[in-house]
Image (spheres, rainbow, N blue to C red):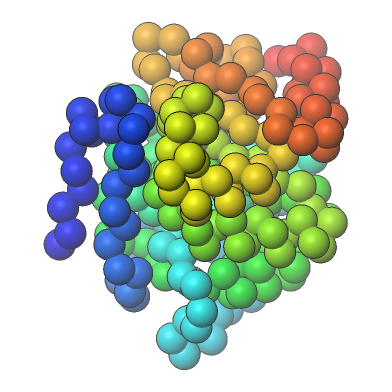
Amino acid sequence: MPKWPEAEEFQSGDHMPKWPEAEESPGLSSPKTSQETSPKQGGQPGGAAPLSGSLPQGPLVRLAGWQADSAVDGPGLRFVVFAQGCPHRCPGCHNPETHLPVGGKVLSVDQIFDLYQQSPGQEGITLSGGEPFAQAGPLALLATQVKAAGGDIICYTGYLYEQLQTLAQTQADIDQLLQTIDLLIDGPFILAQRTLTLPFRGSSNQRIIPLTPTGQQLAAEIGRCRDRF
């Protein structure tokens, strides 16, 4: 089993773990929604069309699960992709089964995009996890396809935006994913700062950061959502 580097190695945010080679693994976990406090469970492939039994082709992503029609991972109905693997391993994490960089299910970018297209009425896609930036390259390709089809991109990360900006200076895949994101929700989940009142965030340290004009519109929608919490 590939060894995930110790969480302490990532505190400085000056490098990114090497992702083990993607290959089929048994068992599909069922992570909960990105908002740590939400009671709704996501990640089940539930109503999605069955995938072909053939091996996936092209760029691959290791997923813990996916969820269509989520209303708790950003404004509107959203298709949520839960990446498998996370170096942060936050105490109290709602999705501890996503921490190891093995397990879950390996799908190609095209297969995930097909699942998105088979789910009508989605405003866009939310990248969650796990840590999406641990698989930045293929997820950037997925986000590009979704945006070309008219969807928007929200991404959760345990890194701070400033850490990602530093990483992007030397790692092209990090920069590519950042360039596709409309709205970033950054920061680790901190149990002592857990909140039930901030929309789409699990702890009060997490920030909503618009990266595009579309992201600014999404942030404004989230601000209006706060009145309902």
Q: Is residue 96 visible?
A: no
Residue 223: percent from left, percent from top: 78, 17
Q: Out of 178 and 219, give the one closest to the viewer.
A: 178
Residue 183 x %, y %: 68, 34
Question: Is 2 or 170 nearer to us in this picture?
Answer: 170
Residue shown at 44% from the left, 54% from the top:
135
Residue 11 x, y percent position in the rendering: 29, 25
Q: Is residue 10 left or right of residue 63?
A: left
State the residue at coordinates (53%, 86%).
Answer: 52
User: Residue 145 location, x and y as percent?
Assistant: 71, 64
Q: Tell me if residue 190 comes above or below residue 160 in the rendering.
A: above
Q: Is residue 194 above or below residue 217?
A: above
Residue drawn at point x = 48 percent, y = 40 percent = 169
Q: Count numbered badges in the picture.
A: 0
In the picture, the quarter occupied by the C terminus is: top right
Give the quadrant of residue 211: top right
- Quadrant containing the N terminus in the rendered view: bottom left
Viewer-proximal residue, 125 or 135? 135
Residue 108 visible in this rendered orientation of the protein:
yes
Q: Is residue 101 above or below residue 59?
A: above
Q: Residue at x 84, y 56 (%)?
A: 150
Q: Residue furthest bottom?
A: 54
On screen, residue 122 versus residue 114, left or right, reads right
